[in-house]
Each structure stands twice: as structure tokens, then as C-alpha cells.
Image (spheres, grey):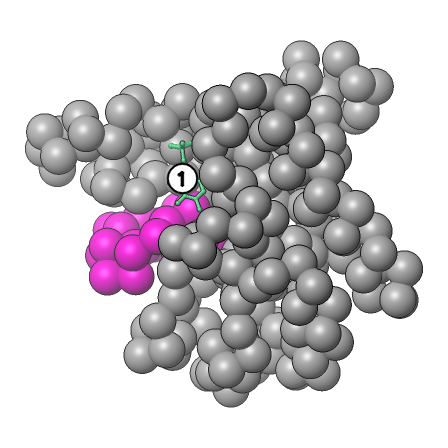
Amino acid sequence: MEAAARSCGRDPQTIALVAVSKTWPAQRVREAAAAGQRAFGENYVQEALAKMERLSDLDLEWHFVGRLQGNKAGAVAAHFDWVHSIDRLEIAQRLSRARPPERGPLEVCIEVNVSGEASKGGVAPEAAAGLARSLAALPGLRLRGLMAIPEPAADAPRASASFRRLRELRDRIAHDGYRLDTLSMGMSDDFEAAILEGATLVRVGSAIFGPRAAAARVQEQ
Ligand SMILES: *Cc1c(COP(=O)(O)O)cnc(C)c1O
């Protein structure tokens, strides 16, 4: 991350790392925390809640990065610090209503489907500004920016083009007066490209913890 930031003249301090610990047991999260990592990403609510409970002695920041079902909104609003994958107003309203006031607003990003894949979550780029406007009015949420999971691009220029589209969209929406300081983009295979295109937060799993297929074989200590 630092090398990528320096190669394009960015301050490495302006780029956050979320370690995506989905499928890995709490003990691996504890090891990463001991090495100085504080922000962790999870996709599955039940799995995440169990880990949070085992790690409640640590001061960690939990990011929900998976697809969010309406019936899980209450648990997510109560236990997570961030949600990266808001793609419809209804889920945002549920999260806002369920957010315990004493925890302060939930930090959220709008997920944008930048590569137009039907199978992917996220709003169409044209719909992002409208959703941002509606979200800004919800008291339980604080809109921080945009997130994308572009389709794995066979070639680096295409991956970069997807990241650039997200940044340009962020710039356009911010121009309307929204303070969008977060561009959540880049994973194990493409975080350098994402940083070159302006990522302020990368979500990296397997490059930190190893291939997820191996996680099933790791026994909880
Ligand atoms: C799993 C996941 C990641 C991490 O993927 P890696 O390729 O293992 O780095 C990042 N973001 C989201 C939304 C994910 O689901």
C-alpha cells in the first residue's frame, strides 16, 4: 500500500486498510490485531457476531462489506461501525431506525455497480446521486462515500478504468455539496491499481490471511 501510494505521490497515511477476515476464526483476527491491525471486514452477520463476542476485549472497528438482507439490518446497525454495501433506500432506512443512538451514526458507503454486471450488488451509477440525497437525510447514518467491487478485469487498464469511474462519480456527487471522503475500492489482486486511482480505503482479505479455501481447515483455538 505504501509503495503504491508513494508511486503516485499520495500520502500513505490517507489510505486505510480494512482486513477482510470473513471465513477466518477469531484467533486469526486476534493475531492481526496484535500486529497492529484495527479495522476488520466481514460479509456474514452470524459469523461476524460470534467473532465480535470472542474478541470483545479488543478495541476493533468492524466493517460490514457483504450483501445485506433486511432481516439482518438490526444486528448490523447494533454491532458494526461501518456498512460499505448500501444499495437501496429501504435497507438504509432500516439501518438508520435500528442504530442505537448512543453509538452515534453508522458510517456508510453506497455500493455502485461500476461494471454493469447483472449478478453484482450495487446501484447503477446513474442512481447513486439520488440515493446519496436520500441517505443524507437519515439521522442514524453518516454517508462517507462510495464502494465498488469491479468485475475481475483480465487486464490492468480495464481494472483501472472501473476504479476511475467510481472516483469520477464520487467527485460529481461531492460537487453537489455532500462530503464524501471515502472511496472504498481495491482488494487483494488490485489494491495497488485502486490506490493509484484514488482509493482511500482498501479491503484486503486473502493477501493478509491466505486463501479462503484454507480457512475451513484452520481449527479454532
Ligand atoms: C471477500 C471480500 C474482499 C476481500 O477479498 P480478497 O480478494 O480476499 O482480498 C473485499 N471486499 C469484499 C466486498 C469482499 O467480499
What are the residue bounds of the magenta stretch? 41-65
Q: Quadrant of ligand 1?
A: top left
- Residue at screen point 37% across, 78% down: 70
Q: Tell me the amino acid under the disc marked 1.
A: Val
Place of residue 212 in the rendered image (x, y in percent of width and height, measured from the top left) = 25, 31
Label 1 neighbour load within 10 Å: few <14, some 14-19, many 20+: many
Q: Position of residue 58 (x, y in %)?
A: 40, 47
Residue 47 on the magenta span = yes
Depth order, front residue of 49/178? 178
Q: Can residue 189 be seen here?
A: yes
* Residue 64 can be seen, yes or no: no
Q: Is mark 1 within 8 Å of ligand 1?
A: yes
Residue at the image point whose x is 23% and y is 54% from the top: 47
List the residue tagged with mark 1: 20
Element marked by disc 1? strand
* Residue 179 is a magenta residue: no
> Could you tell me residue 139's position as x and y percent?
66, 83
Q: Is residue 2 above or below residue 217?
A: above
Asked where in the image residue 201 lies, by quadrant, the reply is top right
Q: Quadrant of the N terminus?
A: top right
